[in-house]
Image: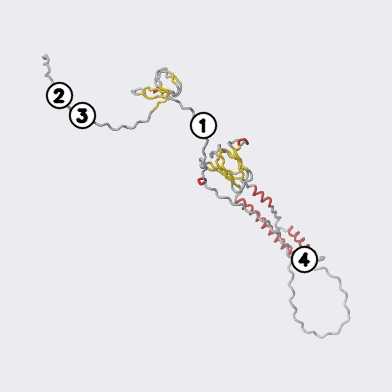
C-alpha cells in the first residue's frame, strides 16, 4: 500500500488535518497581523504639526508658527498666540506666564484662549497621546494570539501521533498461499535440550515527531515612558515685557469762574458757591459738561447732573488750646461823688 515510510508519514498528516478540521474542540484559525498592531500604535503617536494663531479665526494669514514633535517631548515659547490647532495623536500642555496657569488639550482639537480662561499662550509642551496603557494593551493582544497559536500546534502534534499509531495497528493484506511442502517424513529425532530463555524483545518504535512550530514574531520594542510633568511653579520664568498700552485721553484742565445765575458754563470750569442753604461757608463745585446755571445754586443740583462738589480731605485735628490767665490788674481810683437825685414825688 505504501512504498516507504515517507508515504506513510504524509498520509498520517493528511488524516490528522482532516480530523482536526472536523473536530469541534479544534481551536479556530489564529490571525497575527503586525501591520494592524503598528497601525493601532501610530494612531496615538504625535506625527502632525501643531499650529498657533494670533486670533481665533484659525486663518492661514494669522498663523504665528508651527510646532513639530521630533523626539520625546517638544517645548516651545509662543509669544502673541491666542489659539492652537492640536493634530491627532498629540497632547498639548498650554501655559500662561501671567496667571501661572496651565491646561491640557488632546488632539484633534481647536482651542481658543479668548473664549476660555487661559489668556495668551506663552509656552506649549507637545507630546504623544499614546501612553503606557495603550502599548500594554496591544502587547497583551499579541501575546494572547501567540498563546493560541502554540495551543494549535500542540494539538496538531498530538493528533498526528495518534493517527500514526492507529494506522500501525491496522493489519496488512493477507499474502498469497505458499507452496506446499514435501511430504517425506524424516526420522524421529532425539529430544533436544531445553533451550535458554530468549532475550527480551526490543521496545516498540516511538511515534513520528511532528514538525517544529514556527518561531513567534518578536514583539515591538516598547515606547519610552513619559517623563513626569514638571510643576508649573518650577519652570524658570522668561523675562517678558508686555506691549505698551494705548495712549490715554488728554486730561481736562480746570478754569476758575465766578458763579452767576443764567450764566453758561463748560466742562472743567469751577466756582466757589454756598455749600448749602444754611451755610456761611463756600464749597468748590466743578462743571461736568456745558450747560446754563439758570436760577439754581450748585448745591441745589442734588442729582449731580451738572456740578460735582469737591470735598477735600479732612485735616488733622488741632491740639488743645492753652488756657492763659492774665495778671490781676491794679485797683482803680475812687470815682467822683454822683450828683444828688431829684426829689421823689
Q: Judge the density around disc 4: few (<14), some (14-19), many (≥20) Cα neighbours within 10 Å.
A: few
- Between disc 2 and disc 4, whose residue precedes? 4
- Between disc 1 and disc 3, whose residue precedes? 1
Q: Judge the density around disc 2: few (<14), some (14-19), many (≥20) Cα neighbours within 10 Å.
A: few
Residues at discs 4 and 3 in contact (Cβ within 8 Å): no
User: Badge 1 is on which residue?
Assistant: 246
User: Badge 2 is on which residue?
Assistant: 332
Quarter containing the C terminus: top left
Q: Judge the density around disc 1: few (<14), some (14-19), many (≥20) Cα neighbours within 10 Å.
A: few
Q: Secondary structure at mark 1?
A: loop
User: Badge 3 is on which residue?
Assistant: 326
| Residue 19 location, quadrant | bottom right
Q: Position of residue 315 (x, y in %)?
A: 35, 31
Q: Secondary structure at mark 4?
A: helix
Q: Marks 1 and 4, how far apart in space? A: 100 Å
Residue 167: image tag: 4
Q: Position of residue 101 (x, y in %)?
A: 52, 42
- Between disc 2 and disc 3, whose residue precedes? 3
Q: Marks 1 and 3, how far apart in space? A: 68 Å
Amino acid at each position: 500500500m505504501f512504498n516507504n515510510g515517507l508515504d506513510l508519514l504524509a498520509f498520517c498528516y493528511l488524516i490528522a488535518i482532516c480530523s482536526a478540521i472536523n473536530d469541534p474542540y479544534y481551536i479556530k484559525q489564529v490571525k497575527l497581523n503586525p501591520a494592524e498592531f503598528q497601525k493601532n500604535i501610530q494612531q496615538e503617536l504625535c506625527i502632525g504639526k501643531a499650529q498657533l494663531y494670533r486670533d481665533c479665526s484659525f486663518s492661514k494669514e494669522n498663523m504665528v508658527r508651527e510646532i513639530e514633535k521630533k523626539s520625546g517631548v517638544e517645548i516651545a515659547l509662543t509669544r502673541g498666540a491666542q489659539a492652537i490647532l492640536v493634530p491627532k495623536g498629540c497632547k498639548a500642555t498650554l501655559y500662561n506666564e501671567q496667571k501661572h496657569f496651565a491646561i491640557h488639550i488632546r488632539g484633534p482639537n481647536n482651542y481658543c484662549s479668548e473664549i476660555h480662561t487661559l489668556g495668551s499662550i506663552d509656552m506649549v509642551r507637545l507630546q504623544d497621546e499614546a501612553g503606557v496603557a495603550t502599548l500594554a494593551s496591544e502587547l497583551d493582544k499579541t501575546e494572547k494570539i501567540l498563546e493560541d497559536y502554540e495551543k494549535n500546534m500542540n494539538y496538531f502534534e498530538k493528533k498526528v501521533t495518534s493517527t500514526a499509531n492507529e494506522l500501525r495497528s491496522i493489519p496488512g493484506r493477507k499474502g498469497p498461499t505458499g507452496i506446499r511442502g514435501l511430504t517425506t517424513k524424516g526420522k524421529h529425532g532425539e529430544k533436544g535440550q531445553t533451550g535458554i530463555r530468549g532475550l527480551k524483545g526490543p521496545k516498540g518504535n516511538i511515534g513520528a515527531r511532528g514538525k517544529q512550530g514556527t518561531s513567534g514574531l518578536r514583539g515591538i520594542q516598547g515606547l519610552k515612558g513619559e517623563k513626569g510633568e514638571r510643576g508649573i511653579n518650577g519652570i524658570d520664568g522668561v523675562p517678558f515685557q508686555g506691549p505698551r498700552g494705548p495712549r490715554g485721553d488728554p486730561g481736562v484742565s480746570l478754569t476758575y469762574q465766578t458763579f452767576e445765575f443764567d450764566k453758561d458754563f463748560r466742562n472743567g470750569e469751577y466756582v466757589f458757591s454756598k455749600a448749602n442753604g444754611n451755610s456761611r461757608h463756600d464749597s468748590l463745585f466743578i462743571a461736568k459738561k456745558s450747560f446754563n446755571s439758570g436760577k439754581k445754586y450748585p448745591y441745589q443740583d442734588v442729582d449731580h447732573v451738572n456740578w460735582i462738589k469737591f470735598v477735600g480731605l479732612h485735616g488733622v485735628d488741632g491740639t488743645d488750646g492753652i488756657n492763659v490767665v492774665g495778671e490781676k490788674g491794679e485797683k482803680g481810683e475812687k470815682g467822683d461823688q454822683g450828683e444828688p437825685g431829684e426829689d421823689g414825688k
